[in-house]
Image: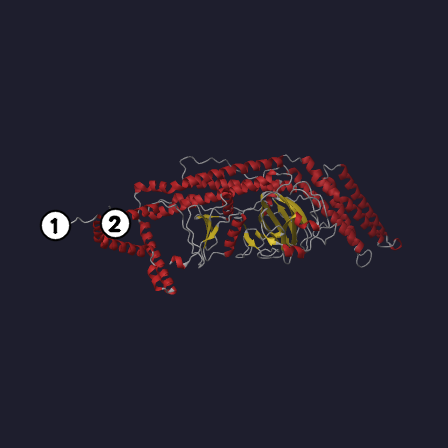
Amino acid sequence: MKNTAPPSRLTSFLKTWIRRLPGILLISLLLHLILIRFWAPHARSVMLLDKDALAAEQKEITQRENERKKAEQEVRAKRALPTEHKEKLREEAERRDKQQAEKKLRDILRNRESALKLREEMFERIENRKEDEFIPEQVSEPFLETAETRLKELAESVEGFKDAVPETEKTDIMRERDQRADELLEQVRELVENIRDNPVDPSEELTELTGVAEKIRYLARQEGHRGGESGEPAWELSHQGNQLNQEVEKALNKAVEAPLINDLSEAETIGDMSRPGPNADIADLYEAGREAEKQTEQAVRDTRAAELALRQHDSFGKAKTRITDWSPDRPDLAGDLRKNTTATVGDLNAYREQVKQATSTLSSMATRTASLTGQMAAMVGDPSSRTRGRNLPPGLSQGWGEGDSSGGRAILSEGDVGSEPGRALATEAKLPEAVISAKALPGRRFTESSSRQGWLFIDTWYHIGPWENHTKTNFAVPRPPEQVIDFDAEYPDGKFSHIEGHVDQVLRWQFLQSDQIRIQPLRVYGSSTYFFYTEVFFDRSREMIVTIAADDAAILWVNGEPVVDRSGLSPYKLGELLLPITFQQGTNTLLIRLENSPGPTLFSVLLCPREAVEDYL
Amino acid sequence: MSPLIDAVFLLLVFFLVAMMYRKELRDIDITPPESISDQRLLPEDDTLVIGIDTEGAFFVQGRPLTATQLHTELRDVSQANPDRRVRLDADAEAPFWRVAEILDILQFRNLSNVGIRTYDERYNR
């Protein structure tokens, strides 16, 4: 018998695999089919190489898939949940988000605490205002400052009135009236002297002065045609009487505030709040968050009113009437969560969504309250400058005039933003607009490694407006962005708040980027107030030359400090105002209040390293 | 030696289980703009995904955020990790100024590792 050699290991291996090959191919085919059916439903269309057919098929598949999913969801949603599992499923739905919600609530409560402390600090300042200093400082002194000029002009008007008719032509009545004019002038002089002697209590003299001013006007009206048909001397005398009356009224209005300067009865009543216990559910956490946010807003409102009262030497109550604020419309998710009985799968899904929305809203509340508290801290932190106040170095608050050395249009001052009043270095420094325009590039970041070291114009802003200014470009009415920058805020007190459906009926912050140096609001309206806000970055603290031009009036705040305050009407003129400003390392904020009279409005802000413009200084 | 079918099923089970452990990211309903010149990048777990829907609303990692929250979030991200990869998922119908706004904030915050998600039919169909 012939011995046959046993098959080698390789042969045996190959034989085994050849036997398995059909099975492997079959499984592979099945896997591919599954892949094509579920993971690449449109793979068949790829073969067609027809773009339109491909798109149509894709659309149809997606639609079918969506319909199927929807139908499945509807069926599932109606399925009742077992009663014994309801509570467990609710807890399960909350579990993941509850931790996050608790964390956010802690943040909100912490922010609330800070806001209340800052409010108390501001209230202390209101309570510490001294009544016996208020009248001399805020009533008598401002009145006496203008009284000298007023007396001088009044005396000139009386002389003009008397000289309007030659002595020989005067009737007896005219002479009597001349005498009366002298007497009234003397009375004014005496009353002003009395106020100077006793500036603590000028109310009696001021009231008397009102009567005297009225008598002057009456006298002038009686002699309406003295000095010819135009009646100019009589008109001038009447005008002086009117001016005096206005100034006295202003002082009297201020004097009324005196007894109220420490009055905080208009302050909000903010109740105590306790942190929800360990067994609190999401609805409780949400409710507590809403309440804490509301109380933070109340504290912010009070702080803003107190800051305004201190800055404008008003009573707290009066300042509060001028505060406009905004609160987001938070949904009543706590009610929805409690109403949801999770009887069906659909209810459970809705419950999960409500839980997620509640957590997300708590997160939004935490961010907002942190932002509000941060801005409050800046407001309270530096009482001397009073955030976004109007205290400027001398020379920076004149109106825009045609540039000359006395007009204050081209002023260089030295020092940090908002520090000691700036020292004028040069009053004739001017740059041709064409030079700046030709060299400027857009940008907001300044670093040592920047290839560009010349003029940069700020091209990116958030802006909001318009508010009505009744053609008064004097920044008299404070607006919310001066106190708080809140990009989520909506202000319903804009210029067109009364026009239903107007695009600017409710004012919101809008992003604005310009490829030009001249920045304009997205929609320009006459007699309007706008605000523009942006941030610039510096890798280290450095001094920059800033130039600002605006049509018509503008205030610029850098890091909350006013650096330029120009009221009045003016055309846009670039390069006439060069300000050295030291920016801090990191992010710096810029806020502009732009006032427009009828007509167009625009502004520009450019920054440049000092060395790049040294030749012009 | 185990049959190949065992190995195949083993792999299948492995991938199925692996997919269950993927990081949870919520979807937002957007249709990205089309592009034929994009660059394919492998996904990273810590990519910051910023979404903008057709209404111009912001989302970060699927969570809806207000403008103030977005500013705060991006400031925090830039302080923690300025090299973090950022992906912008903007709907093709989203207002373009919103896209410009996000890109500007990212640039200002020095977050330069930024990509825009697009839809490329060569790869997706």
Q: Nearer the viewer, residue B117 or A453?
A: A453
- Residue A503 location, x and y as percent? 54, 57
Query: Residue tagged by mark 1?
Result: A2
Report the disc number at residue B5.
2
Residue A472: numbered disc: none
Q: Secondary structure at mark 1?
A: loop
Residue lying farthest right?
A168
Q: Can you name the residue that lies furthest to the left here?
A: A1
| Residue B99 appears in the picture as rendered | yes
Q: Quick check: A120 left or right of A221?
A: left
Q: Chain of mark 1?
A: A
Q: Are marks 2 and 1 in contact (CB under 8 Å)?
A: no
Q: Amino acid at mark 2?
A: Ile
Near-viewer residue (A250 or A223): A250
How busy is the neighbourhood of tag 2: few (under 14 within 10 Å), some, or many (20 plus)?
A: some
Marks 2 and 1 on same chain:
no
Dot 1 amino acid type: Lys
Q: Nearer the viewer, residue B81 or A495?
A: B81
Q: How many marks?
A: 2
Classify 10 Å Cα crowding around label 1: few (below 14), some (14-19), many (20 and above). Answer: few
Q: Secondary structure at mark 2?
A: helix
